[in-house]
Amino acid sequence: MTSRLALRGDLLDFTADPGFAATAEASGLRWRPDHWLLIEDGHIINAQPAGSVDSEPDASWQRIDHRGRLILPGFIDTHVHSPQLDVIASHGGALLDWLERYTFPAEQKYADPALAEAGAARFVEALFAHGTTAAVVFPTVHKVSAEALFAAAQQRGMRLIAGKVLMDCNAPDGLRDDVDGAERDCTDLIQRWHGRDRLAYAVTVRFAGTSTREQLAMAGRLCAAHDGVFMQTHVAENTDEVRWIAGLFPEARSYLDVYERHGLLHPRAVLAHGIWIDDRDRALLHERGAQIAFCPSSNLFLGSGLFDWQAAADAGVTVSIASDVGGGTSLSMLRTLADGYKVQSLRGLRLTAWKLLHAATRGAAQSLGLAGEIGSLDAGCVADLAVWDWAVGAVAMHRDGLAQDSRDLHERVFAWMTLGDERNLAATYVAGERVY
Ligand code: GUN
Ligand code: ZN
């Protein structure tokens, strides 16, 4: 029997990239206040105005009234580390120091299957509790940590892209693999999980600093040999890191060029940060169709730098936005977007809520090649949704009231995005099932 679910609320999504235009000129926004969103067997089939007797879904529908709330596509976090919930908000240190002091010791523990399983469940549930329904995730070097993550996502019907982390040098004991063992593990994981339900494999090079040339070449071969696999890594996050990589790979023109030389740049490549890149790198990213995951919270917290979104856009590079927990300090994409606004503000660019929200929904889906499945409220998409209260707490309620009086939708949505976080979340649905 067909399952039928109708959700009533203010529907907000995008049909195209609003770009850097000022609010008044924004295109691509789709705003449907007080509508029913109709979901059959986990897929969105239609939306219709609410409020009149003829437009009520009939008794064959399970009706849930979220009137007065926002309904958006679930957020897509294009770069986040599942084991790093254990080190989120750790004091002191820039990237390389932070990795050594906090991150590597925490990740060592994920060799334990029971700990990996509990950590994966905690992580996936936490994403849902922040309104995120799809993610591109780093577990650890341990095969069991990738297994546990895939299994946790599969049990919950979630769209997940992940892969065992590759690192065969410059890392402590218990956190290194080797080329042959890693190739066997990756091949096995790809066969087991890639393309199964809503899961996809990402060849996961931690960063150029923790893989030998031989391992990078093996990662490139995996990308070439397996249809549709993603690639994820970090690039040019921190100036000390960039200098270190230049010393390790003197033959490369730039940090990004290390990946290019090993066949790792392609349309399903997601590279976190890209702060310290130049125009030749941007041209190369564009040419290869690879995307940057901008991680503003992490970049501020670790003091890494201010990503140049305008230059990336001018070069035709696709940019999504990501929490990068535990370098980032919140799984909340609302907080992440608010940080993104502030970082770009420091560069003199005032992004609209439309541009930011698009980057965390349809924009991310498009750059991952998944726009037919996630990121919007289009008919045919899977019903991965988050339902939000406009305001929580006296200050936000006061501000929201004034924004309503102004009748300026952008003012209201921008205040929601800037003041909101997971406390605003009323419900999360994955494939039409309530998961939070
Ligand atoms: N570069 C290599 N590993 C990491 C990581 O775990 N977090 C961040 N932010 N950057 C990295
Ligand atoms: Zn990261």
Image (tube, rainbow, N blue to C red):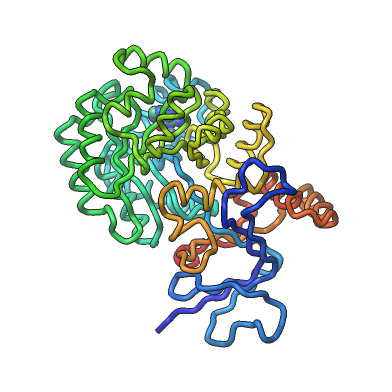
Q: How many marks?
A: 0
Residue 124 horizontal/vertical position (percent):
43, 52
Residue 185 appears at what percent x and percent y? 19, 42
Left or right position of 333 against 396: left
* Residue 405 position (above or below residue 222): below
Please tell me which residue lies in front, 120 or 403. Answer: 403
- Can the viewer see residue 225? yes
Q: Residue at point 40% right, 38% down?
A: 290
Question: What residue is at 70 percent from the left and 52 percent from the top?
Answer: 413
Examine the rendered structure and indicate whether residue 242 appears above or below residue 428: above
Residue 344 image-quadrant placement: top right
Across and down, in percent, residue 108 comes to 31, 33
Q: With 195 as the anchor, is 299 left or right in this view?
A: right
Nearer to the camera, 264 or 197: 264
* Residue 115 visible in the shown view: no
> With 225 as the anchor, is 301 left or right in this view?
right
